Image (tube, helix red, strand yellow):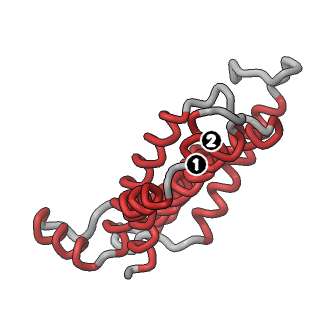
Amino acid sequence: LIPFVDDTGSQHKIVSGLLALIAVGIALGLILPKDEHLIHEWYRIVSNMMGYTYFVCWSVCFYPQIILNYRRKSTLGLSPDFCLLNLFGWSCFAAYECAMYFDTEVIRLYRQRFQTSDSTVQSNDVAFALHAWALSILYVFQIIYYRPKGSPWRKALKLKRQTWYLLGAIVTPALGGPLLFALNL
C-alpha cells in the first residue's frame, strides 16, 4: 500500500498517522469558516476540508526537527542559513497571505485589477503561512539558544547594543508584518 515503513519495518504507524492527519484536516475543514465566495455549499465544504488537510499534513513536517533539537539540546547539522532564509521567505509569504485575506484595500485593488470577486486566498492558507512563520522563528531561536560556546552565532549575540537596534529596525517589519495584517492594523 505505502512504500514507507517506520524504524521497526512496520507500515501500521505510518498509515495510522496519515489517516489521523487526514481526519484532523477534515474536522477542521468542517468546523472552521468557509469561503463564502465559492459558488456551491458543497464546494465550500470540500474546498475547506482539502485546504485544512493540506494545512495539517504540511504543518507536521516542521515538528520533527524542532523536537529533535529540543531532545538533543543542539542544532548541529541544521543549516542556520537555511533557517534564516526560511524565516524571511515565510515572513514575506505570511504578509502576502494576510494582506490578500484581511486588508480591504488590497482586496478592493485585486477585484478592480482582475475583474473578479476576490482572491483565492482562504483561511487555511493564512493559518498555514502564520504557522510556518511562527515555527521558523522557533528554528532560529533554537539555533541561537543551542549553539555551542565559541560558535559564530554565540559571538553574534555579543554585538554592540547599537548594532542590535539597527538589526531590530531591519528585521522587525519582516517579522511583524504578518501580525499587523492579521490584526488589520
Give the percent coordinates (x, y) of residue 169: 38, 63
List x then y, in percent, for residue 4.
71, 21
In terms of image quadrants, where is residue 107?
bottom left
Residue with the most extreme right position: 8
Q: Which residue sits at x=19%, y=67%? A: 110
Residue at image point 49% right, 60% down = 161
The numbered dot on residue 154 is: 2
Residue type beneath disc 2: Arg
Left or right of residue 143: residue 46: left
* Spatial CA span between label 1 and label 2: 5 Å
| Residue assigned mark 1 | 157
Residue 63 falls in image quadrant = top right
Residue at the image point whose x is 62% and y is 30% from the top: 78
- Marks 1 and 2 in Cβ contact (< 8 Å): yes
**Image quarter of the N terminus:** top right
| Residue occupying the point 33% across, 68% down | 99
Q: Residues within 10 Å of mark 1 (few under 14, many from 20)?
A: few
The residue most toward the bottom is 185
Q: Is residue 1 left or right of residue 89?
A: right
Q: How many marks?
A: 2
Q: Position of residue 40 (x, y in %)?
A: 39, 68
User: Residue 69: where, in percent of width, then height?
Assistant: 74, 38
